[in-house]
Image: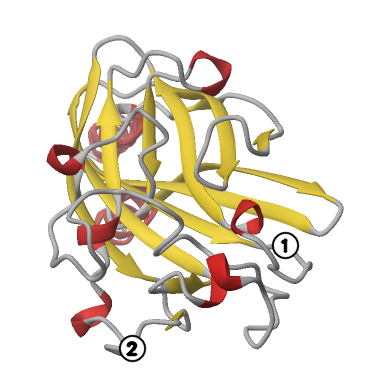
Amino acid sequence: MKKTLLAAILALAVPLSAGATSIGSSSFINGGLGASAAFDLTGNILTVTLTNTGSGDVMVPSDILTALFFSTNVGATLTVGSAVLNTGSTVFYDAQGQPAGGVVGGEWAYKSGLSGAPLGANSGISSTGVGLFGAGDLFPGPDLEPPASPDGPQYGILSAGDNTATGNSGVLDSGGLIKNSVVFTLTVVGNLTSISNISFQYGTSLTEPNFSGGPGDITVPDGGMTLSLLGLALGSLGMFARRRA
């Protein structure tokens, strides 16, 4: 009986601590434009999946999703890990074809301590400079399209509804655009408790469209919940054993 009870306790506790935990998502829809960002935490690795969910056709660079801005709480620092194409995503307009292993880190950057970002965000992930990101902020990976710095519309994200045969020269001659999702990993140093001030940036300037993400701030679940639950369960098992003795 005790073995059965212990097995039930472990079956309950392990899923809470093993594998990725979805801590929240943010999204917006505005006409033909739309995007989402999903945040998952595995140990000290934060995974951010950025997707252009828009239904509209991308005709000009200001229709291209190029950045995600957000704030982390004081006491939490993020460092770059990787940037790769999401499953089913494809690069268009790059004469060199698809990036090896889906790695697009050489075209995307992460920076914290931002000043002047939308909504007062202190962090951001971007494929373009917008006066905030430089070559030293890039994720690991080869330079897929010069210059060796986040710049211009290249390797921004096309909408789900884009017709890749249309668009002006800024789109068709961009040197590479992604349809329609990228997965980023960041290492968390410290205690990540919240993600706020989330917004989605389009184009190559902060004066171009930017949309606040809903439904609101993301509160990261307490990582100690699993241990507390397991301790409570083991305590209950001890009481059961004493009663049986």
Disc 1 + disc 2, Cβ < 8 Å: no
Q: Nearer the viewer, residue 79 or 40?
A: 79
Residue at 78% over, 49% down = 29
In this picture, is 76 found above or below 208? above
Secondary structure beneath dot 1 equals: loop
Residue at 87% over, 53% down = 31
Mark 2 Cα shell of 10 Å, populated few (<14), some (14-19), many (≥20): few
Visible residue check, residue 227: no
Instruction: Tell me the residue that label 1 is attached to.
Output: 54
Q: Residue 235 appears at what percent x and percent y? A: 27, 29
State how far apart marks 1 and 2 are (Cα): 25 Å
Q: Residue 182 appears at what percent x and percent y? A: 41, 63
**Which amino acid type corresponds to the residue marked 2 in the rendered image?**
Ala
In this picture, is 99 found above or below 34? below
User: Is label 1 or label 2 in front?
Assistant: 2
Q: Residue 22 appears at what percent x and percent y? A: 46, 48
Instruction: Tell me the residue that label 2 is attached to.
Output: 95
